[in-house]
Image (spheres, grey):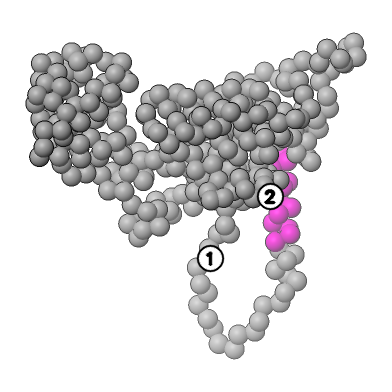
């Protein structure tokens, strides 16, 4: 191994230590090592063992992808495989994802990767994807582009300013925590999107131009009320204004890079109006599907045939709340 490899791993380890705001002594104590040895590793005067690289990575909470990068920089092979979600090895993961997405209906749910690219979603995502132009869906839809692009969901958000500020703060925090170059490029792109030219709908009070004593515009939804969620997703639809919040789910103790980077965002209604509207939308979609299948009679089969497994219809991608 040439002399540059220990220096490279030392530079990377120092970057991760500084990103976590730890001194060499702090990290040495947490990793059950010495500050002197850690200093030698960072400056390239000592080569860390494979076990030391993995121990420091764990203490620094380095993502699995970057742990492999550290090992390669130290002259070792990667520790964690990176599989395709379509591999047979990931069949149990696909099954779990399908179950979560399907059972969450009639409420929206979506699966994303580390850069918030949409991998799949359930049928209820259609309420958020309505009117999204094709160029935002190719080559792969991205949650931040779908939400903040002027031609995306942003034109239908009743609280766009709040959502935009929250999304940019969240993405910036993720960039600082991971140092991910792709996330940084995404942040620089979406923060430069212009605000769409949409009517200004007040979030909590009537505008200055409103008549004395007038309340907020009638959106078809109940009046705003105190919420346990700081920034809900308030979407204007033909049914009225829908208000939702979301929660994120990840897989525990992943041993695969792909699995460690998957996240499932589950949306929930914030009020009864939204819950009833989403249930009604799902019921209407089910009725339409039933009428369509009833219109075409099934062919008569003279002998019994084992039916193929049912494959869920393709999911529509989504945006986080």
Start and end of the magenta stretch?
Answer: 275-289
Among the 4 quarters of the image, the one containing residue 270: top right
Ranked by sequence position, the earlier of labels 1 and 2 is: 2
Q: Which residue matches tag 2?
A: 282
Q: Is residue 211 visible?
A: yes
Q: Relative to 287, is 97 above or below?
A: above
Q: Magenta stretch containing residue 276, yes or no?
A: yes
Which class describes the residues within 10 Å of circle 2: few (<14), some (14-19), or many (20+)? Answer: some
Give the camera-side residue of 249 and 157.
157
Among the 4 quarters of the image, the one containing residue 7: top left
Left-right relation of 78 to 192: left
Q: Residue at x 54, y 83 (%)?
A: 304
Which class describes the residues within 10 Å of circle 1: few (<14), some (14-19), or many (20+)? Answer: few
Q: Residue at x 31, y 39 (%)?
A: 65
Q: Relative to 269, is 295 above or below?
A: below
- The CA span between labels 1 and 2 is 19 Å
Q: Which residue matches tag 1?
A: 310
Give the camera-side residue of 122 and 9.
9
Q: Which element carries disc 1, helix, strand or loop? A: loop
Give the percent coordinates (x, y) of residue 257.
32, 43
Report the quarter where the N terminus lies. Answer: top left
Give the percent coordinates (x, y) of residue 35.
13, 15
Report the quarter where the C terminus lies. Answer: top right
């Amino acid at each position: 191994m040439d002399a540059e490899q220990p220096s490279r791993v030392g530079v990377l380890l120092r970057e991760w230590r500084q990103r976590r705001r730890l001194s060499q002594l702090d990290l040495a104590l947490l990793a059950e090592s010495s500050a002197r040895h850690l200093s030698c590793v960072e400056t390239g005067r000592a080569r860390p063992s494979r076990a030391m690289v993995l121990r420091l990575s764990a203490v620094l909470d380095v993502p699995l992808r970057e742990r492999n990068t550290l090992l390669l920089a130290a002259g070792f092979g990667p520790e964690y495989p990176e599989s395709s979600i379509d591999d047979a090895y990931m069949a149990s993961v696909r099954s779990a994802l399908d179950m979560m997405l399907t059972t969450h209906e009639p409420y929206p749910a979506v699966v994303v990767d580390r850069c918030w690219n949409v991998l799949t979603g359930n049928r209820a995502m259609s309420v958020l994807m309505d009117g999204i132009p094709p160029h935002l869906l190719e080559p792969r839809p991205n949650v931040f582009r779908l939400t903040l692009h002027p031609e995306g969901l942003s034109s239908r958000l009743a609280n766009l300013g709040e959502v935009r500020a929250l999304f940019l703060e969240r993405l910036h925090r993720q960039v600082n925590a991971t140092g991910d170059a792709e996330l940084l490029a995404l942040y620089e792109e979406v923060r430069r999107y212009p605000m769409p030219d949409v009517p200004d709908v007040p979030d909590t009070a009537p505008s200055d131009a409103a008549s004395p004593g007038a309340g907020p515009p009638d959106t078809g939804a109940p009046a705003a009320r105190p919420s346990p969620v700081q920034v809900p997703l308030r979407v204007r639809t033909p049914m009225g204004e829908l208000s939702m919040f979301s929660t994120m789910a990840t897989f525990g103790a992943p041993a695969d890079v792909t699995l460690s980077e998957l996240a499932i965002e589950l949306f929930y209604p914030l009020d009864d109006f939204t819950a009833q509207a989403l249930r009604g939308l799902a019921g209407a979609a089910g009725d339409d599907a039933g009428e369509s299948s009833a219109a075409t009679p099934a062919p008569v089969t003279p002998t019994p045939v084992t039916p193929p497994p049912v494959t869920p219809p393709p999911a529509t991608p989504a945006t986080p709340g």
